[in-house]
Amino acid sequence: MHYYSIEDVWKYWLSLNVSYGAICSTELKRVVREKWQEDNTFTHQVFGFEFNKNEMNRALSMHLNHPKSKPIFPLLMKAYDKPKCIEIMQSLNIEIPQSYKDGLRNNNCLGDDYGCVQGGIGYWQKLYRINKEGYLRRARVEHELTEEAGFQITMCKEQSNDAKELENKKDALLFLLPHPDYPQNKTVLDVKAREPKPMVDCNGFCGTNDLIKRLETEKEINLQTEMAL
């Protein structure tokens, strides 16, 4: 299947973000990588998973479920998370993406059509404040796909106890803007969420983390990664 834009993916599959991930990520990243993998000879594939629990689990999954990819994870090996990477870039006078300056946790799909469909509730609430026009564009996409599919298609879902008790689970889906055909569905602006923490620290104390005792976990990851190489 050939796509000319990310919107083509959403429209073809009538999907944005579901429990097992975003359809655009699957079609434009994983499927393309696996096709390249089958057509080429290589020693390793490098994955930029950062140093945190979720990314460690992803790395383990790659080793167990996708051994043909021969993955290596240099950021995990060095115990570098995103703030550390940004600190290094700043120390080298490399301009960081505006999204990180705005306090977002990723720089995915941020251009004229603003916002990553895998962003959480707090992510979208922040985007509403810093780029309302982009937020409204994504809201229109949700409405258009919903109208074509005949059921709710959104990027976020409410996780409260009340939402979990709903008889129709689709009523827990959160639109970016109210949809007139689904008044029972809230929007991401109606619920409380944790706002993404800024990763850029310009207070002049960059590098002070180097004085902190290194974690034993870091040694374990380094050893395991080196053995995999």
Image: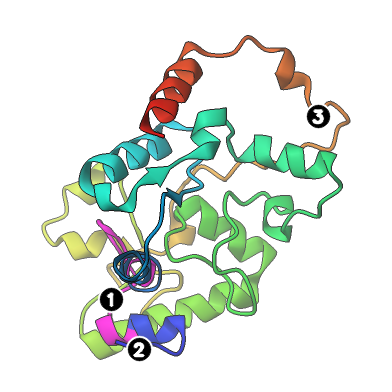
Q: Residue at x 84, y 26 (%)?
A: 205
Q: Which residue matches tag 3?
A: 206
- Residue type at numbered disc 2: His
Which of labels 2 and 3 is toward the front? 2
Residue drawn 39% across and 87% down?
A: 3
Marks 1/3: CA–CA distance? 48 Å
Please name the residue shown 51% across and 42% down the image. Answer: 194
Query: Is residue 160 visible in the rendered structure shown here?
Result: no
Q: Answer with the quarter of the image where residue 37 lies.
A: bottom left
For the N terminus, the image quarter is bottom left
The range drawn in magenta is 11-26
Q: Where is 77 relative to 155, above or below?
A: above
* Residue mark closest to the camera, 1 vs 3: 3
Name which residue type carries label 3: Cys
Pick the front one: 81 or 40: 40
- Location of the C terminus by quadrant is top left
Cα gap from disc 2 to disc 3, whole angstroms:
45 Å
Front residue of this view, candidates 142 and 20 = 20
Classify 10 Å Cα crowding around label 3: few (below 14), some (14-19), many (20 and above): some
Q: Which mark is residue 169?
A: none
**First in sequence: mark 1 vs mark 3:** 1
Picture residue at 52% right of the left edge, 60% below the top: 124
Whether residue 168 is situated above or below residue 122 in the rendered picture: below
- Element type at mark 1: loop
Residue 220 at x, y percent in the picture: 42, 18
- Crowd band around label 2 with a 10 angstrom C-alpha radius: few (<14), some (14–19), many (20+): few
Q: Where does label 1 land, which residue?
A: 182
Q: Is residue 15 magenta?
A: yes
Mark positioned earlier in the residue sequence (1 or 2)? 2
